[in-house]
Amino acid sequence: MTFNKWLKLSLLIICTTRCAGGFTTVKVKVVDQDGLAIEGAEVFAGGQLGVDGENIKDLTDKEGVFRTIGRKNLAVVFRVNKEGYYQTKLRTNKNLQNLIIELRKKKKPTAMYAKTHILRFPKKQASIGFDFEQADWVAPYGKGSTAHIYFNLDGEYVDMWNHHSELNITFPNSLDGIIEVSKNTSTSEFKFPYLAYSQSYKNSLVLKKSREGLESKRLLNYDESALGYIFRVNTEINSDGEIINANYGKILGYINTSSQVKKKSAGAIRFTYYYNPAPNDRSLEFDWRENLFRDLEHEEKVYEP
């Protein structure tokens, strides 16, 4: 019997015989995205654990199970890792006697252009092409060469309590488009689908935001808590209408718009995007070590997969 297993057993016996009134057994099962048990996953549990309230770290057994003891009714912070999987973090005080935590496999981490970007508009009420690879407007407003997507911003900013903005997003090709992805319950660091969808893209999207007066609430026609968007661009079809070429990517979270006019800008948007330049590759798993952008500023760098 290893020291960790002996210690774990001793603590469980102590909890059962001496202090059962204030403690409870904590049992966690770690599974993959298909529900299969994962042996050897490292589970860090932080909170009021053990007899002395220490943090506990151990590996899951052959059944994918991690056990310890914890004080009743207090939340535990779990951090679960294993090579070849995306990390999962979870803070909970529910179902601690039979908790299931999912680790999602790393299937195809991919090199992409990924950046948190502030895009300032040269003019209002104009559809201007944006190049994902250059992270800039196309000519004559920037150094971009390919209009992957068009942005059109309109609005007015009086002060933080009185403003409105409307962002129209369109695409150059009929089968290009965008899909909103709703927030899910996953606690994995990678929450998006592994692959971009093959259909159901909308060729346009309108995002509206407004507030009228100090006592009013912000009005939005979109969900700020959504996971984000998946997009398809550069779509080419054959004579039968079948897609023969396309590029895919995603936007993390919502697109924050501002109609506040500043120097050399008619408003701005801020968004985090990932663009996969490999034709017909629908992978949405970003390998942050293979960002195709170089020399990004700290606030522009993206580490989420």
Image: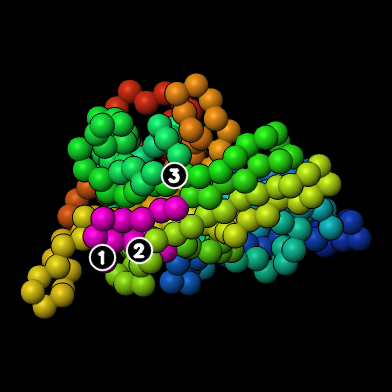
Specify the segment rendered in magenta.
168-179
**Real-space Cα separation, disc 2 to disc 3, in angstroms:** 19 Å
Who's the residue at 65% across and 49% down the image?
210
Task: Examine the rendering and report whether any part of residue 237 can be seen.
Answer: yes
Q: Secondary structure at mark 3?
A: loop
Q: Amino acid at mark 2?
A: Asn
Q: Residue furthest left?
A: 239
Who's the residue at 42% across and 35% down the image?
123
Q: Which mark is residue 174?
A: 1
Q: Residue furthest right?
A: 21
* Crowd around label 3: few <14 · some 14–19 · many ≥20 (10 Å): some
Q: Which residue is mark 2?
A: 203
Q: Position of residue 130 (x, y in %)?
A: 31, 42
Q: Which residue is mark 3?
A: 125
Colouring rule applied to residues: rainbow
Q: Quadrant of residue 170?
A: bottom left
Q: Earlier in the sequence, mark 3 or mark 1?
A: 3
**Real-space Cα separation, disc 3 to disc 1, in angstroms:** 22 Å
**Real-space Cα separation, disc 1 to disc 2, in angstroms:** 7 Å
Who's the residue at 17% across and 55% down the image?
279
Q: Amino acid at mark 1?
A: Ser
